Amino acid sequence: MSKIATIVGGGVIGGGWAARFLLNGWDVRIFDPDPQAERKIGEVLDNARRALPGLTDVALPTEGALTFHDDLAEAVAGAAWIQESVPEQLPLKQKVFAQIQAACDPGAVIGSSTSGFKPSELQAGAAWVGQIVVTHPFNPVYLLPVVELVTSPDNPAELVARAADTLTSIGMYPLHLKKEIDAHVADRLLEAVWREALWLVKDEIATTEEIDNAIRYGFGIRWAQMGLFETYRIAGGEAGMRHFMAQFGPALKWPWTKLMDVPEFTEDLVDLIADQSDAQSGAYSIRELERIRDTNLVGMMRALKAQNWGAGELLNAQDGRLKSGSVLGARAGEIADVSQPIVTLRRAVPLDWTDYNGHMTEFRYLEAFASASDRFMELVGADADYIASGGSYFTAESHIRHIDELHAGALFTIHTRVLLGQGKKMHLFHEMRAGDRLIATGEHFLLHVSLESRRPSDPSAEIQAALERIATAHAALPLPEGAGRFVGQPR
Amino acid sequence: MSKIATIVGGGVIGGGWAARFLLNGWDVRIFDPDPQAERKIGEVLDNARRALPGLTDVALPTEGALTFHDDLAEAVAGAAWIQESVPEQLPLKQKVFAQIQAACDPGAVIGSSTSGFKPSELQAGAAWVGQIVVTHPFNPVYLLPVVELVTSPDNPAELVARAADTLTSIGMYPLHLKKEIDAHVADRLLEAVWREALWLVKDEIATTEEIDNAIRYGFGIRWAQMGLFETYRIAGGEAGMRHFMAQFGPALKWPWTKLMDVPEFTEDLVDLIADQSDAQSGAYSIRELERIRDTNLVGMMRALKAQNWGAGELLNAQDGRLKSGSVLGARAGEIADVSQPIVTLRRAVPLDWTDYNGHMTEFRYLEAFASASDRFMELVGADADYIASGGSYFTAESHIRHIDELHAGALFTIHTRVLLGQGKKMHLFHEMRAGDRLIATGEHFLLHVSLESRRPSDPSAEIQAALERIATAHAALPLPEGAGRFVGQPR
């Protein structure tokens, strides 16, 4: 088959499909009578080109060719995949399928992005029903992997398998439903939450923001890595899913939601769920699942922390509270004794800093040393406000020695020596210790730069003065062991 | 007030509360007649000590003292916070409150972990109703920040404010509900999804695993960083929330769920939601929200990738497909020409690799160089199977020079030179280029180690042979510029 995908209907969903195919090396043809289609698709592509290529740890294939077509027949001729994303009106969709089928390859897959219609409804009246399937993606299509693949008995197995393979090849996860149903699976869950949330707003229990916070500071983070059932399996403890259902089963009869049409918790249903849960998660003990969950949560929450968003924003606020009043929150003028190396970091090794060797992985040492440099910059006045005003320090050169190992949870401290602090130059030497054990050293040469010209420039007079005060005091200390080493130098 | 918290009822939730308080420097007293309580709480504490301290970028306070008590009166005397987490039976909870109030400080907060009961129900018949509030947390309590604070008109404002401050001080986000309601907010949403999901399993549309995948490969990741309403605001595009509601409002009448009791979409309700959404997210344009969302998603998905879990497992599988058949998937024997530096990495800069200076941040250079070293190890045979068999390479020393900048999305390649490959020693020199631009160099000295003894040891004969073959070929190349430099060396 060709590697040509035709996108019928632009907009956010069609544009997302276009981006997914294009960035995975397919040629993409767009058909959309909207005169704004090219601009809209271009905007989605801008977002996708910003986000998707770096998500993989391997370069994506060369982008395919993107073309816009006024003629649907021309657009679909010879395409291996045709994705329909027109508005959610059944007669409109059926009309579009008729036009597509008049010109497309009979072996092509015609996928519909419909949120709610069943494939049998889409297929009704089609020239050849077998090639029309539901392939329902989630926004942003270029990042989120799940796509609901819904078929009817009229779809040949070969075509369904080929559709699944194609979706997998562009980095998606085709979830093939066992039976067709209105709104498929994910949108039914979303619709249930949406309806309940509307009641909560209408009844003035909570605002939209409070409801969003209830989600993103809580079960939303859990659901990003395990879903509903695996999470509840853990909640059931060692007794597992059956215990959870026994415990929370009665709540099905309680008015915990306005949505009261519930299945009866028969023994058959309990067995079905418990058995499926065993098949899904039984390879891990509850303790193992707890630890996998926690490591995932820590990794994701730390990712959000770097963006100062959601749960990460809360963590940064908590860090601020922990720092205030401590040496890690002080300014240079408040440090009485600058004759000794300065504490610039005191923290524990996060769960997501370890590697396949079971210890803190090498690049996290530089992350810790870079945090220590940041803290030192802040101490002499090169803080967030100063950086916003256009000056900063860039690291020109670094040298790290690994002397001992650290494991997750280990508490360590970094002490910082100034070896040179003069004009635009700042030469720092960090020592990382866990208790008395020297773990690593980091030697760094930084240059003050103008963030506009990206060229070296002098820092403010205040920073120069603060830096020189410490540099002068530290000059009286003996040169630290290991300073000035090169890689491979005999000890 | 004292910094003493009393936990009444151990188990997973009580244990989580104990861990949160203890690791934030509070003394914690446990009352639970279960003879297994000490073991159970100990297990939760083990998990918490593994996960929480590294979540903050600042060391937590010194842990408080943990004590177990057989006498409830003794346990609660003088405590500032008493947290009840006994089973979900109203008369039992009321009885426990009576016993607590017979001995506790009248100024203490008594928080209930109830999932469903309203504070007015808990307070009924209490000696002093004002000190009993709902503080409903989410598992794992030591990591997830949200706690629903539900009060009745009988709770004094001073006590409610103090409860909120205390929860904030231990890193939580108190969501204070405007009114009490059965099951509060988050559990109503969860209950709606649970009920709908039970139907999907019962009707054999999807298995528990498929439903979990529909969540964690899709909207679950979105919800970890924005909730329902902010996500839908983006879906509405520049026209925002009102447009979304106009578009998807009709679906409220459709059978997209079995749960059909829905509020009517009156103009008042549309206005209420649109106005609340403006207040919540109006500071950002839709384009800004899209980019914040994408950066968050990329960061979280990459965090999951490092754990090879959920969406991250899918991404790793896709990386494998992208590598296969390329130079990045080959073994040493398959590389015909080893006379030149070897391509060990070709990738784009991920969104989460940039910093406040707007470029790739320094520790990500070492991450890239470490990936290149890993790939080189794999190439000579020190792959995942070899590491599992007990041998690996540890980096002893690294030197990085920053020569030019890289921004998010930029494609770069690393070429690797072997400067020494002899016995247990491996000295590598990486050059990072974007097109013809030299961006950075990384010089690394690695030692082969036994993962059991953690001491240097010789690699397998196969690895030695493969390494020496390349080292010998590379020895004919001129020494790369910058090799052997020390930090601060004049150019």
Image (spheres, coloured by chain):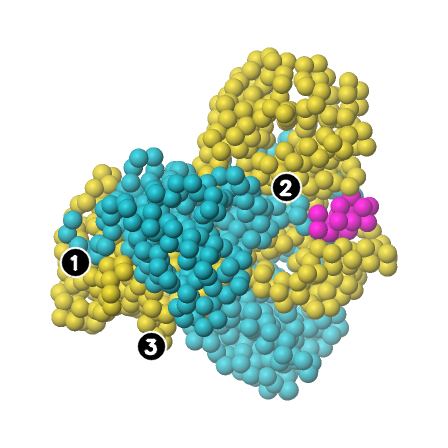
Chain colours: A cyan, B yellow
**Residue at the image point whose x is 68% and y is 70% from the top:** A123
- Mark 1 = which residue? B421
Q: Which residues are magenta?
A: A195-211
Q: Quadrant of residue A159?
A: bottom right
Dot 3 or dot 2: first in sequence order is 2
SS assignment at label 1: strand
Are the residues tagged 2 and 1 within 8 Å (C-beta)? no
Q: How many marks?
A: 3
Q: Quadrant of residue B253?
A: bottom right
State which chain disc 3 sits on: B
Q: Is residue B7 in view from this perspective? A: no
- Mark 3 = which residue? B436
Are the residues tagged 1 and 3 within 8 Å (C-beta)? no
Q: Residues within 10 Å of mark 3 (few under 14, many from 20)?
A: few
**Residue at the image point whose x is 78% and y is 49% from the top:** A201
The amino acid sitting under disc 2 is Tyr
| Discs 3, 2: same chain | yes
Work out whether residue A33 or residue B285 is closer to the camera in this orientation and state it: B285
The amino acid sitting under disc 1 is Gly
**Residue at the image point whose x is 34% and y is 38% from the top:** A434
Q: Which mark is residue A273?
A: none
**Is label 1 or label 3 in front?**
3
